[in-house]
Amino acid sequence: MGYLPGASFSATGGQIKIVSQLAAGAFATSYEVTYNGRPALLKQYNDPTNTQHTPWYSNYLAYQDEIIGRVNSPAVVRHSVTILAVFEHKKKYHQIHEWVPNKTLREAISDGSVRRDRDLLQKALIGFVEGVAAVHKAGIVHTDLKPENALLVNGRIDDIRIIDFDWSLVVGKKLPWEGRERGTPGYFSYDWMKGRPVTHQSDIFTMGIILYEMITGRHPYDSAAPGPFNAHDGSQQKAYLPLIERGYYEDVEKHNGSVSGGPVNRMLAACLSKNSADRPSLSDILQVLKNAGKAGVLHLIHANKFSYTLTPDDSTNGQGWFGQEKCRMWPNYQFVSAYQADFLFDENAGCWIVDLPLDGSRPTNTTFINGKPVSGRVQLKGGELLQVGNPSTGNMVLDLTVEIKL
């Protein structure tokens, strides 16, 4: 039984008064309330087993206590909202949350405000990823990321908070439930749908969907459906998995021309990879987003001490290769052709170098640093102009400023 507006009761040493019901779901109902006279949000939970105080129920409450402790930590709470109190009332579990005047990310996607300004969109993308990163650093897998679970404080695009940890997982802890849905139709991770372990990389899959929506205003797989399809309609979930299996969606610049698609498309393709091991780290995603639009900058990101060659071969889905292994870095190399030089890390000198093999494989190109032709191995320094081609004719296959990112 829920609460009617105007109802009041005492709990956790405070007085709670119901203002209005905000939302009702199968597992919880949320209300706008006052808590000791101050605005707050109340969540009243239903026991899905309908057997209060069974081991499932008590285990869930203990598990939530652990989640709440982590969410309320200083590193996480600035990307979320404070959970002020938990209690039982009339045999139901309740949480009281800090009241944050907001609109949801869903609203900002639907009305287009999140992508109306390119700089604000970049801040929103970065803010959302930083929020997820804080949650992951606290040892939590969210499992239910979606635009409705991200709040824009006071409607500000550049202040995003991650909420709703009802079905989150604590890394290394046994779950108090098994077999339950982990997520929301349209945002289920591929891992969960295939019966695989749900990990931080599962969140990254779902995050790829949300980032695509933020940039384009549409779900990535909507355009891939053979007929009318709503990814958010639970009755159409049988169609959802085959679309993911097919892996087709349109490049972001088709729907938002203000975004330089190359590195962003490659990053999203990696997030939406069916193989969780191929999905990028959050730090790599942030690096791409922070450097989005900085055309003409070569970014060597979080690279280990091995040599590799960047190739723009479409068969790699925009991902470079080194040896027989896929490259997990995300450099901005949309201007690079098959004549790209090799970049290596010199462990002895502790610096990046450009390697220009004289094997006849690049007969028509000369490499220049700051306008001077070079050959062999040459140390790269930040701020230098690296060119491959023929500057005198303008026939350049590479014309970038070096920005070293170790």
Image (spheres, rainbow, N blue to C red):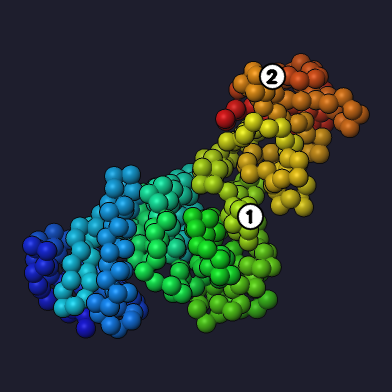
Q: Amino acid at mark 2?
A: Gln
x then y, percent, for residue 292: 57, 42
Left or right: residue 156 compared with residue 62? right
Residue 127's spot in the image, x, y percent?
Answer: 42, 47
> For residue 241, what is the image quadrant?
bottom right
Residue 8 occupies which quadrant of the picture? bottom left
Tell me, yes or no, if residue 261 can be seen here: no
Residue 242 location in percent, x, y?
Answer: 65, 73
Residue 307 - label = none
Q: Residue at x 55, y 43 (%)?
A: 284
Is 16 on the left or on the right of 268, as rendered? left
Amino acid on which the number 1 mark rests in the picture: Ala
Q: Tell me the residue that label 2 is attached to.
A: 379
Q: Secondary structure at mark 1?
A: helix
- Of the image marks 1 and 2, the number of the one nearer the N terminus: 1
Q: Residue furthest top?
A: 372
Against 124, is 104 above or below? below
Which residue lies under the disc numbered 1? Answer: 269
- In space, the residues marked 1 and 2 are separated at their CA atoms by 32 Å
Q: Residue at x 51, y 42 (%)?
A: 283
The secondary element bearing badge 2 is classed as: strand
Q: Residue at x 16, y 78 (%)?
A: 90
Residue 289, image x and y in percent?
53, 44
- In the picture, the quarter occupied by the N terminus is bottom left
Q: Residue at x 89, y 32 (%)?
A: 361
* Residue 13 in view in this figure: yes
Name the image quarter holding residue 123: top left
